[in-house]
Amino acid sequence: MTDTPKRTPLYDLHVELGGKMVDFAGWEMPVQYPMGIMGEHKQCREKAALFDVSHMGQVILRGEDIGAKLEKLCPQVFSTLPEGKARYGFFTNAQGGIMDDLIVSNAGEYFFVVVNAALRHQDIPHMAAHLDGVEVTEIFDRALVAVQGPSAEDVVGRLCPAARDLKFMETMLGQIDGVDCRISRLGYTGEDGYEISIPEGEAIRISRLFLAHEDCEPAGLGARDSLRLEAGLCLYGNDIDNATSPIEASLLWAIQKRRREEGGFPGAERILKEIAEGAPRKLVGIKPEGRAPARQHVEIQSLDGETIGEITSGGFGPTVGAPVAMGYVASAHAAPGDKVNLIIRGKAQPAEIVALPFVAQNYKR
Amino acid sequence: MTIYYSEDHEWLSVEGEIATLGITKHAADQLGEVVFIEQKEAGDEFAQGDEIGVIESVKAASEIYAPVDGEVVEVNEELADNPGALNESPEGDAWIYKIKLSDASQLDGLMDLAAYKDMIG
């Protein structure tokens, strides 16, 4: 990572739209626009919002049996991932922790992988070193734009009708006003929507076409964070990291049956043991009863004052209209309905363990 | 009535030994949309530099530091139910405390509007 933050192909558009630019993972990104985080959040839940996510790493894998080779690094099934399908996964380490989470798409002639901005420098050499005979190419000349919300289908579909027929976690190549784009129906907000990989020189022009739709407004990283938190989606570095196992992180759903039975991925010993016996701690939803937001690192105590965990993500949930949080608690205290105390500025604030997500996911299945 | 400003972006409107305290428009704009405020209670005493409250916005928590020594004589209870007022009217209806000054000479260490405007640029 260099000292000077990098700019995405959409930088000039952010500035023109009044984006408040901040340094995020080495990138100069808009945290919000004049509408404000609360308004942008609601815009995405009710209509559609456009996010620049070009800071994330886009990678193309070419070669034989890519899916099977990826299974040596990840506890997912990728060998039978059908062409045109995308799947959520993660790289695990030998201790069963999560090195990064990612989206893997089978694009037919190649695999398309999207990794976190801060970890592209780890993930790309990791894949290059372990995927024998696979050519690992990071794409630097394409922007990645997310259009999310109930109106996203119309925002994207009126420019590329075939995109309307995609279902959640499907991907296609499509033309938008003559430009070849990879269009994938997925996202990080809990809403229906798309992530669209666009050649950098056309990214602003295509983004303007999306924004020309009356239902679509730009949204920044602030709203992206509150949206994903309400949707119960993990943020790498907050909720999952090298020390947290996928079972602790309540990500068992993302480990397909065959891998649970056969293992054969880094850290399988710990992960399979935790599948069988349970993990000592669990990532749960936490709903403060008062109005004070509980942020990252807030201590969680049992009602008798024992430390049982820590908040990993927390803030105000604009759609919920109240503070929301996620954190790890000892498994004995992890059942929805369990009461805990959050130690906020030295004072115990009552809270309840709740099932995630806080806001129902609204995917097009 | 004289209005003073602190380096921590508070305003203090002084009438006799009572001052009304709030945050400046500039501070409110920097904080972003306020979702919660934690206030002290009437009767609480504090010294200059003490933390006398916390304002939470959608982005982060920010402490309010006492610009002078004093005692809380009145709390603006409306803010608990409507913290967003701090964005709408930070230098008006959304005052935070009325305080009794312990040492009026401390006001000399604060800024007037012109000096505060210079500071925020």
Image (spheres, coloured by chain):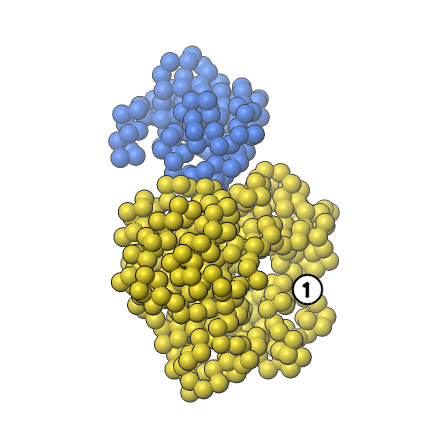
The chain letter for the residue carrying disc 1 is A
Asked which quadrant contains residue A312, the reply is bottom right
Which residue matches tag 1? A280
Residue at left 45%, top 50%?
Answer: A48
Judging depth in this view, the residue of A48 and A244 nearest the camera is A48
Q: Nearer the viewer, residue A88 or B28?
A: A88
Q: How many marks?
A: 1
Of A203 and A213, nearer the camera is A213
Q: Position of residue B89 (x, y in %)?
A: 43, 26
- Is residue A269 in view? no
* Shade representing chain A: yellow
Closest to the observer, B17 or A191: A191
B12 in relation to A14, above or below:
above
Q: Is residue A224 above or below residue B47?
A: below
State the quadrant of the N terminus of chain A: bottom left
Q: Would you call the spot at circle 1 few (<14 residues within 10 Å), some (14-19), or many (20 or more)?
A: few
Residue at 48% in and 85% down: A65
Residue A225 horizontal/vertical position (percent): 48, 52
Kind of residue at badge 1: Pro
Q: Secondary structure at mark 1?
A: loop
